[in-house]
């Protein structure tokens, strides 16, 4: 079996840890209740980020707001809802990649992506780990999505330089894949993987 597209392109520009983008996101949030609908320079900046990634051929447009949830994860979840709406509005049909280390943020983004009467493409969730997958993978029954398995374990990696060895990475990937396909109904082509840097 050959895969027609073994790699996917994820636009990563809407990420709060990018200094300029994070500053604009903060300015936008500080505008108050209608910040994500009323015209403003920060909103125009975000729109340009989304539209430029679509124009560049991204398969997904990632949104990561973890920098805003460090003190209060609910803030990142609320913001994710707003940014998912913006990707749905300005992404030209390119699906969102909901990117967070917090499962509640991932779930909030998924719920909002499907909170429309319009047909939308299957989103991507980034990411699940072996020790979080049984919290996120069951959500497949409520909201259809593809998933990125992050190949990192709770245990200390024992490969060169503290990284995971090839055997450890393979074992982690196999565990996520087996659970996703065998237990939660994912198709093989809906599972992607990446390793921790």
Image: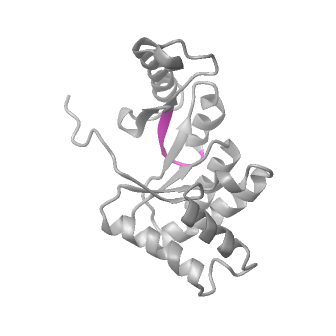
The location of residue 86, given as percent across then percent down, is: 54, 71
Asked where in the image residue 40 lies, by quadrant, the reply is bottom right
Q: Is residue 43 left or right of residue 55?
A: right
Q: Nearer the viewer, residue 115 or 66?
A: 66
Rendered-image quadrant of the N terminus? top left
Q: Nearer the viewer, residue 119 or 149?
A: 149
Identify the residue at image location x=21%, y=41%.
4
Q: Is residue 105 above or below residue 41?
A: above
The location of residue 159, given as percent across then percent down, is: 48, 13
Colour basis: one colour
Q: Is residue 23 left or right of residue 2?
A: right
The location of residue 111, given as percent across then percent down, is: 62, 56
Identify the residue at image location x=34%, y=50%.
9
Q: Is residue 164 visible?
A: no
Asked where in the image residue 191 lies, by quadrant, the reply is top left
Identify the residue at image location x=40%, y=35%.
187
Q: Nearer the viewer, residue 46 or 138?
A: 46
Identify the residue at image location x=23%, y=36%.
3
Which span is picked out in magenta?
142-149
Q: Is residue 127 visible?
A: yes
Q: Give yes or no for residue 144 being in the magenta stretch.
A: yes
Q: Give yes or no for residue 164 being in the magenta stretch.
A: no
Residue most extreme to the bottom: 39
Q: Is residue 36 above or below residue 193?
A: below
């Amino acid at each position: 079996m050959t895969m027609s597209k073994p790699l996917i392109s994820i636009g990563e520009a809407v990420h709060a840890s990018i200094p300029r983008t994070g500053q604009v996101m903060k300015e936008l949030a500080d505008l108050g209740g209608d910040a994500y609908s009323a015209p403003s320079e920060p909103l125009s900046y975000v729109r340009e980020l989304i539209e430029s990634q679509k124009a560049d051929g991204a398969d997904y447009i990632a949104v990561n707001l973890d920098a805003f949830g460090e003190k209060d994860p609910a803030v990142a979840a609320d913001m994710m809802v707003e940014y998912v709406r913006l990707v749905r509005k300005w992404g030209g049909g390119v699906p969102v990649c909901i990117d967070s280390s917090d499962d509640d943020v991932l779930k909030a983004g998924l719920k909002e992506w499907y909170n429309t009467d319009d047909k939308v493409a299957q989103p991507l969730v980034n990411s699940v780990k072996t020790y979080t997958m049984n919290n996120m993978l069951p959500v497949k029954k409520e909201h259809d999505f593809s998933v990125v398995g992050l190949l990192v374990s709770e245990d200390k990696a024992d490969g060169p330089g503290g990284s995971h060895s090839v055997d450890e990475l393979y074992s982690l990937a196999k565990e996520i894949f087996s659970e996703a396909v065998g237990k939660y109904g994912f198709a093989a082509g809906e599972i992607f993987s990446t390793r921790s840097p």
